[in-house]
């Protein structure tokens, strides 16, 4: 008695429908991975741009004149295609009472940096200036 080594033709391999379903599942999986990668890349570019603006603002703040030579008004310029602007103005608040005869008076310093794409960052700080009459 001999048995045939050929399998039944109706049960061998995959049907066209099974192949199409498997390919559609693979395409859906790859599309979701592609979307995840694209989102990660956009996030990385956003973080990179924010870090560039932050380092530009820090560079500008580090290059500001000494607090006794820092006058009220505006300064502006550009570093690495990022426009920056510094505004120095008297510090005013209703929360604390400033002494009239103080040796030091607070000044508000605002550094604004704008990227070529239009994204902006603003850093506010307060510095003490020697009063003019002391």
Image (tube, helix red, strand yellow):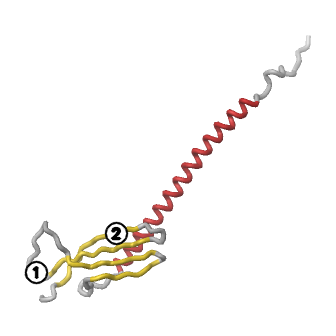
* The N terminus - image quarter: top right
Residue that mark 2 sits on: 122
Report the number of discs: 2
Q: Element at badge 1?
A: loop
The picture places residue 16, in percent across and down from the top left corner, at 76, 31
Residue 74 as seen in the image, left or right of residue 29: left
Taking depth in this image into account, of 94 and 12 the one nearest to the observer is 94
Residue closest to the far bottom: 133
The picture places residue 55, in percent across and down from the top left corner, at 41, 71
Residue closest to the far right: 1
The picture places residue 96, in percent across and down from the top left corner, at 12, 69
Classify mark 1: residues with Cα within 10 Å, few (<14), some (14-19) or many (20+): few
Q: On screen, 11 above or below 114?
A: above
- Residue at the (10%, 80%) spot, across then down: 102
Q: In which quarter of the image is residue 50?
A: bottom left
Residue closest to the far front: 118
* The C terminus - image quarter: bottom left
**Which marked residue is nearer to the observer: mark 1 or mark 2?**
2
* Marking on residue 34: none
- Residue at the (42%, 70%) spot, across then down: 53
Classify mark 2: residues with Cα within 10 Å, few (<14), some (14-19) or many (20+): some
Q: On screen, 17 above or below 116?
A: above
First reached walking from the N terminus: tag 1 or tag 2: 1
- Residue at the (68%, 33%) spot, across then down: 21
Q: In which quarter of the image is residue 132?
A: bottom left
* Marking on residue 102: 1
Q: Element at badge 2?
A: strand
Q: Are marks 1 and 2 in contact (CB under 8 Å)?
A: no
Q: Quadrant of residue 86?
A: bottom left
């Amino acid at each position: 008695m001999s048995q045939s080594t050929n399998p039944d033709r109706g049960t061998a391999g995959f049907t066209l429908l099974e192949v199409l379903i498997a390919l559609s599942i693979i395409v859906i999986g790859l599309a979701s991975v592609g979307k995840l990668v694209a989102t990660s890349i956009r996030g990385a570019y956003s973080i990179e741009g924010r870090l560039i603006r932050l380092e530009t603002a820090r560079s500008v703040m580090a290059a500001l004149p000494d607090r006794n030579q820092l006058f009220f008004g505006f300064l502006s310029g550009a570093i690495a295609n990022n426009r920056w602007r510094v505004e120095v103005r008297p510090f005013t608040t209703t929360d604390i009472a400033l002494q009239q005869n103080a040796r030091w008076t607070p000044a508000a310093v605002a550094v604004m940096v704008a990227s070529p794409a239009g994204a902006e960052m603003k850093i506010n700080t307060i510095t003490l200036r020697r009063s003019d009459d002391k």
